[in-house]
Amino acid sequence: MKEKSIHKFDKPSVSVDIVIFTIQDNELKVLLVNRGIEPFKGKWAIPGGFVRIGESLEDAAMRELEEETGVKDVYLGQLYTFGNPKRDPRGRVITVTYMALVNSDRIKLHAASDASEAEWFSVRKLPSLAFDHRKILDYALKRLKWKFEYTTVAFSLLPKKFPISHVQRIYEIVFNKKFDKRNFKKKLLSLNILKEEGIKKDVSHRPPMLYSLKKNIGEIVEIL
Amino acid sequence: MKEKSIHKFDKPSVSVDIVIFTIQDNELKVLLVNRGIEPFKGKWAIPGGFVRIGESLEDAAMRELEEETGVKDVYLGQLYTFGNPKRDPRGRVITVTYMALVNSDRIKLHAASDASEAEWFSVRKLPSLAFDHRKILDYALKRLKWKFEYTTVAFSLLPKKFPISHVQRIYEIVFNKKFDKRNFKKKLLSLNILKEEGIKKDVSHRPPMLYSLKKNIGEIVEIL
DNA sequence: TGAATAGTGTCTTTCAGACAATATGCC
DNA sequence: GGCATATTGTCTGAAAGACACTATTCA
């Protein structure tokens, strides 16, 4: 139980890591970058970087997100802070993790890429990951499901106007489970968070009603 | 948008702050310490301290908790990490916040106190707080309610054996709201997380059945 | 027997979940 | 007409919520 007297001067480093989710090809995908340097050179990792001295954690997360995907103004939420002293072999690094949800239409991958190789992976076919990033990703997946159940974050994966079938699709992908069309619609409409936006044209089948998320809906609304 | 080249060497400091809740005199209370030094000298603050280089965040939180209250082995959960660059006038301090729930029977206040003046405050009569601690406390209160609704943390505020009326009492205190005795008991027993422990003796009224929380109950169990 | 707290049951309403047939638009 | 997708209603079972009287122990 001896006390180190150096603790006031020996500071840990602080990084942010962002688990970036999107939906592509009817699958839930996460963006990973291939590490060009040691440690874990050649392994896949969650994108991230060190926090600059003058920027907030959210700003740091936003900056990294934009560097990787070229998008801004998406859902970004803090997940958890991991601080095991041995999680990084280079030294003490505490990482504050964030989750981002990006509509795949808007992504320009490698927009401002600093030569890092980035790729989307299905969350059901993940490679082995660097550091404790597997633990972080597993945690993010749990939280993502939780967020889908209890909040309206799912709509940040959709364009402004969408048919209900698309909402159902992303819920089915995230939960890896089918829902009954009638019950799903009944529940969703009963929440009173959607506004009718007219009927979609130019489809080769019966055209659906489009909806949008009402303004000023707080984040916490029970969905499922 | 200029980039500071020093960011790799100029590190933020990292602290942990612990919001310690207990129930005393039928009120929800939180432990605050009076700051003996600048900044905010004389103001009340949430207890905390800097993370030592070799210890995990949980260990740091535990250490601070034990220094303040003399207790270990209580519920301790991470809340959120606050990192606004201007939250501490002394410089860049990122704080990882935790919430602890302590059974008031077990508390020895000032057990290992480092001359800090500590006091329990009702959450409904709070003084003005140092730093952004009011924000942290408000957040902790929200999370506490959420935890009470969806998990079994409430039982960490009770001794091993307890009557159901005591469980109901702490729920009523936390939610500041009365519940129906019959419905509360029906719901609680239907969860199948309690074990009968025989009838309490030596009370000057009808003696209640005592219960204990079953072993191996995971944390997430919906309560209310 | 009075004070204090424990224990108990029914009815109503709400919500989740199971389930299948018809409608529309385009080719 | 055939294809693709959208739209619609009813029944059942489970759970939540409202509600009041009796039981036990001790002083």
Image (spheres, coloured by chain):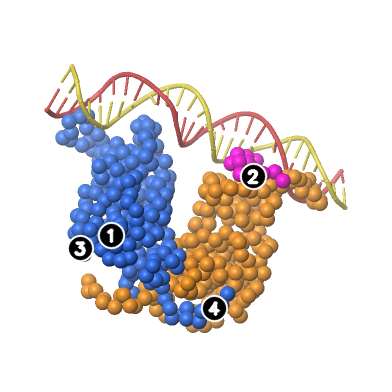
Chain colours: A orange, B blue, C yellow, D red
Q: Residues within 10 Å of mark 4 (few under 14, many from 20)?
A: few
Image point (20%, 58%), residue name: B110
Residue at the disc numbered 1: B42
Highlighted magenta segment, given as a residue range: A182-197
Which label sits in the foreground, 2 or 1?
A: 1
In the displayed structure, A90 sits above or below B135; it is below
SS class, disc 4: loop
Q: Is residue B71 left or right of residue D10?
A: left
Whichever of labels 1 and 3 marks the residue nearer the N terminus, that label is: 1
Chain letter for the residue marked with disc 4 in the picture: B
Where in the figure is residue B166, as x and y percent of width and height? 28, 39
Residue at the disc numbered 2: A194
Calculate the distance from the C-alpha at mark 4 to the C-alpha at mark 3.
43 Å
Whichever of labels 4 and 3 marks the residue nearer the N terminus, that label is: 4
Residue at the disc numbered 4: B3
Calculate the distance from the C-alpha at mark 1 to the C-alpha at mark 3.
14 Å
Q: Residue A190 shows which numbered tag?
A: none
Depth check: give the residue in front, A76 or A54.
A54
Q: Residue B115 shows which numbered tag?
A: 3
Depth check: give the residue in front, A138 or A100.
A100
Q: Is residue B25 left or right of residue A52?
A: left
Which label sits in the foreground, 4 or 2?
A: 4
Where in the figure is residue B173, as x and y percent of width and height? 33, 41
Calculate the distance from the C-alpha at mark 2 to the C-alpha at mark 1.
50 Å
| Residue type of the residue flagged with mark 3 | Ala
Calculate the distance from the C-alpha at mark 2 to the C-alpha at mark 3.
57 Å
